[in-house]
Image (tube, grey):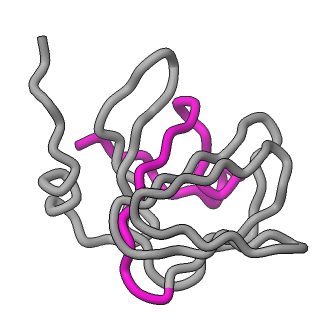
Amino acid sequence: MADAINLAARLATFDEKWSPRTIASFNGHDVMVVKVEGRFTWHSHADTDDFFLVISGEIDIQLRDDTVTLKAGEIFVVPRGVEHCPFARTEAHLMLIEPTGTPNTGNADTAADRKVI
């Protein structure tokens, strides 16, 4: 049996923003932590929903016709195919869950390399 995963300890191992780190896998999905600040890129995922859980801080998930603001302890799921742009005014920490291999920009050519910690 594996040990418990401490999210704060894993987040303390890196400083890069918008570069998700895989901390666990289950049923063909990656569980990731990421530090974010500033604006990401407008993108969508044609084949999967996009799951966001705010661990600390606050982010806006900008949609073309709305903005969803998330605070620590809140989740939001962007439905597949919906264009969105995450934005954090100050550093925030998130947990993401998505099928293994899903590019964070929706495009493999522009996605951050997937790192496992």
Is 102 situated above or below 43?
above
Queried whether the magenta region covers residue 78, the answer comes back as: no
Queried whether the magenta region covers residue 92, the answer comes back as: yes
Q: Residue at x 32, y 31 (%)?
A: 24
Across and down, in percent, residue 116 comes to: 29, 41
Please identify the quadrant where the C terminus is shown: top left
Across and down, in percent, residue 49 comes to: 71, 41
Q: Residue at x 13, y 18 (%)?
A: 2
Residue interval drawn in magenta: 89-117
Is 110 situated above or below 46?
below
24 relative position to 63: left or right: left
Q: Residue furthest right?
A: 65
Across and down, in percent, residue 58 comes to: 46, 75
Q: Residue at x 33, y 67 (%)?
A: 56
Tell me which corner region of the image, top left, top right, bottom left or bottom right, holds residue 39.
Answer: bottom right
Across and down, in percent, residue 5 comes to: 17, 37
Q: Residue at x 43, y 72 (%)?
A: 36
Considering depth in this image, is 75 or 51 the residue closer to the camera? 75
Task: Give the total of numbered labels.
Answer: 0
